[in-house]
Image (spheres, helix red, strand yellow):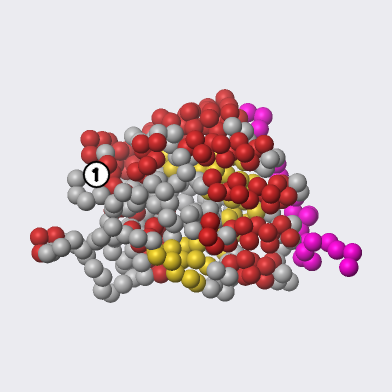
């Protein structure tokens, strides 16, 4: 195997279609020394004018999202958000997980948007793009500060993460849950630690994620499991075990999507799959193609996240039967949008 960057998901720096000039390694034989060295994390500070984004996609169950970070050190090789890094002049490959953009003023901008005259309470996904509890959150605490703003105005929020750091904020989440203002989804892709370490190298272990579900459930915070993405030939057979384990630890619901490899993610995943699972590359790659009409690059609404064909049918039948077996009678409570207060916390003074 060529040099492998341990602790990173992507192993290549893909081309950015928005750049006129860039470094490439098309002719390795002409290089006197490696062009890529072990990448270190770099932080870039940004001050956006808004933080709440309207989501127009018809196959996503959310109206608004906000992302305090762009790029993600978790390094999940399949991450659909990788392509968005190209808009910043970076690559969707190694740059995505090593060049992290921190939106330092996110909590201030959030409060300003909530106070706008035309804003009406609606659940906001935190985050919809990259993980709001990725490693840099320990330092910057933007997610915690944003939750404090939401709690101040009693505004509904949903969160999805694969990092156990969320337990740090149980105090705020419990406060929001007392008014039915929060839902949490913990993402668990696999219970196989050997697979997780190469596919999601800087994420919490599956055991830590299960204990996170348990801690949230004990605190009275509505929590479910997101078993995604399902990759045929790699983790599809784990669906029953993942959902059962999550249910045993207090999960109220489960969701799933199948893998899709749009844009540069196709090259990143293909390179990763060849290096880590050469013996089953053809099987996995061809089955992914079968989900999306013969290609891994799928932008068709309805099919891109659910898949289509015989393999997709098998995956969905397995998911539905497992969810019925372990989660029947459980569900996330509805949000109470009437609690929203533009004046913030009530005061006698």
Q: Nearer the viewer, residue 67 or 6?
A: 6
How far across and down, in percent of the image, does residue 242 sit?
A: 49, 32
What residue is shown at x 43% (from left), y 36% (from top)? Answer: 190
Residue receiving disc 1: 274
Q: Quadrant of residue 122?
A: bottom right
For the point 79% across and 61% down, the residue is 345
Q: Is residue 36 magenta?
A: no
What percent of the width, then of the height, locates residue 276?
27, 41
Q: Nearer the viewer, residue 280 or 139?
A: 139
In the rendered image, which quarter contains the N terminus? top left
Furthest-right residue in view? 348
- Reply above or below: 307 against 82: above
**Magenta span main SS:** loop
Q: Quadrant of the C terminus?
A: bottom right
Picture quadrant of residue 323: top right
Residue 106, above or below 290: below
Residue depicted at x 43% and y 60%: 71
- In this view, the residue farthest toward the front is 139
Nearest to the observer: residue 152 or residue 113: 152
SS for callout 1:
helix
Answer with left or right where residue 148 lies relative to residue 304: right
Q: Residue at x 43, y 66 (%)?
A: 43
User: In this rendering, would 300 be left or right of 138?
Assistant: left
As displayed, is residue 338 above or below residue 35?
Answer: above
The answer to whether residue 286 is seen in the rendering is no
- Label 1 crowding class (10 Å Cα cut-off): few <14, some 14-19, many 20+? some
Was residue 329 drawn as part of the magenta stretch in this picture? yes
Q: Is residue 92 above or below residue 191?
A: below
Magenta span = 328-349
């Amino acid at each position: 195997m060529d040099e492998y960057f341990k602790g990173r998901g992507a192993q290549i720096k893909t081309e950015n279609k928005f750049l006129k000039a860039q470094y490439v390694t098309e002719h390795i034989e002409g290089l006197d020394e490696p062009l890529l060295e072990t990448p270190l994390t770099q932080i870039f500070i940004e001050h956006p004018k808004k933080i709440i984004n309207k989501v127009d996609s018809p196959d996503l169950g959310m109206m608004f999202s906000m992302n305090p970070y762009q790029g993600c050190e978790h390094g999940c090789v399949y991450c659909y958000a990788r392509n968005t890094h190209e808009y910043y002049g970076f690559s969707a490959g190694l740059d995505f997980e090593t060049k992290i953009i921190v939106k330092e003023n996110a909590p201030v901008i959030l409060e300003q948007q909530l106070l706008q005259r035309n804003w009406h309470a609606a659940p906001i996904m935190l985050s919809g793009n990259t993980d709001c509890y990725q490693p840099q959150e320990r330092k910057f605490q933007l997610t915690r500060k944003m939750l404090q703003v939401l709690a101040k105005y009693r505004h509904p929020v949903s969160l999805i993460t694969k990092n156990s750091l969320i337990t740090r904020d149980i105090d705020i989440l419990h406060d929001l849950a007392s008014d039915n203002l929060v839902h949490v989804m913990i993402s668990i892709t696999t219970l196989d630690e050997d697979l997780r370490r190469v596919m999601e190298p800087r994420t919490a272990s599956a055991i830590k994620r299960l204990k996170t579900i348990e801690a949230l459930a004990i605190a009275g915070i509505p929590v479910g499991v997101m078993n995604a993405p399902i990759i045929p030939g790699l983790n599809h057979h784990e669906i029953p075990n993942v959902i059962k384990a999550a249910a045993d630890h207090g999960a109220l619901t489960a969701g799933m999507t199948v893998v899709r490899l749009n844009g540069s993610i196709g090259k990143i995943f293909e390179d990763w799959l060849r290096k880590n699972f050469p013996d089953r590359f053809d099987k996995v790659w061809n089955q992914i193609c079968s989900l999306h009409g013969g290609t891994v690059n799928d932008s068709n609404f309805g099919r891109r996240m659910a898949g289509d064909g015989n393999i997709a049918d098998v995956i969905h039948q397995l998911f539905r039967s497992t969810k019925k077996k372990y989660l029947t009678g459980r569900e996330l409570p509805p949000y109470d949008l009437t609690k929203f207060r533009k004046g913030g916390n009530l005061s006698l003074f």
